[in-house]
Image: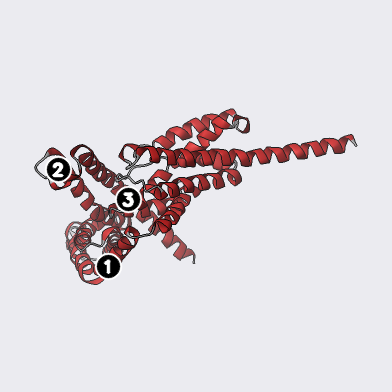
Amino acid sequence: MGTLKTFGKNLAQHFMTGVSYMLPVIVSGGLMLSVAVIFGGQEAMDEPDTIWGDLASFGKIALDLVVPIIAAYISYSIADKPGLGPAFIGGMVANEIGTGFLGGMAVGIISGYFVLLLKQIKLPPRIASVNTMIITPLIGSIIISFLTLYAFGKPIAALNTGLTDWLLTMSTGNAVVLSVILGAMMAIDMGGPINKVANTFGIAAFAEGIFTVSTPMWIAVAIPPTGMFLATLIGKKYYSEQEIDTGRTAMVMGVAGVTEGTIPFAVADPLRVIPSIVVGTSVTSGLVTALGVTHNVNIATYLSIPFASNIFLYILCIAIGSLVVAFMVNFLKSLKYRNKDVASSSETAASED
């Protein structure tokens, strides 16, 4: 059981390495496409001879790199440099047959452990020196490319197509439920493993062009720190001077897209803070989907405002969720202080008797 748990923990770490290397590429590609459409209009996507058409093409090239990059860096995390070549090439094959994000992750895992196995083979000293540079990458690339094309790539491509179609045709009610769940997952551990699962799911949806899923995930990022900042402004009597300063810091971190700014509040008072940020963030994510607001950039809450399909409603969703966090946590804290006052009065009355 312990070995299985360690394997799962290591696998999650390999996934996160792949996501962290992929993120700058997907953000750059998404932004280039967005800027091209904003200044060149939707027709920029089909006009390669204009500057905005060129920019849109660059964005598409960047997004085409997403699958090979996540495959390569998951493999790199498992097997070090020898894992890069086979996974890059396998990832390109996976991208060609339409496996999407799921295929990239599968190629990365299979490639990484296969190369790790190859590295265990003892070779004669005369050829051992070229093993890392030539033999392992060559054998790995051939095997992984064939496996991707003929073994697991096509079933994953079919699964990816089915999942994409389901997400695209999801009813509004189901989409809102999914968004509420994503919002809760983004808030509950403030950058921890559950947050990362929701984040990875949202990024995968973005890579497939499903902005109705990526938008509620990305808008959720800054709701906990914003809500706690507002809470310290509205209910100063419930917070120490240090906590009020922490609230200002949390707000700055929230603007930069860092949910972890809420952690000091959650550590100090988890029973009141965590339920409040989960509820408020879920409200924002569900609301943005219910109102039909999306953006096609892969960046967090505030930085994506200019790219929202309806900027006013997008900001309104941020404001409502943040206020829900602030008022709920302060209400729960008021109950705590009221109970303390009642207990203190009872003790005083008892001592007077």
Q: Which mark is residue 158?
A: 1
Whether 243 is drawn above or below 325: the answer is above
Foreground of the two, 4 or 34:
34
Residue, x 42% and y 61% (percent of image)? 8
**Vertical placement of residue 330 versus 70, above or below:** above
Compare marks 1 and 2 and give the one earlier in the sequence. 2
The dot on residue 61 is none
Instruction: Give the residue type at disc 1.
Output: Ala
Question: In the rendering, which numbered label is found on residue 53?
Answer: 2
Mark nearer the N terminus (3 vs 1): 1
Instruction: Give the residue type that dot 2 points to.
Output: Gly
- Percent x, y of residue 206: 31, 51
Q: Nearer the viewer, mark 1 or mark 2?
A: 2
Q: CA distance from mark 1 to mark 2?
A: 31 Å
Q: Is residue 259 visible?
A: yes
Q: Name the residue tied to disc 3.
A: 211
Left or right, 243 with respect to 96, comes to: right
The amino acid pointed to by label 3 is Phe
Question: Observer-nearest residue: 126 or 164?
Answer: 164
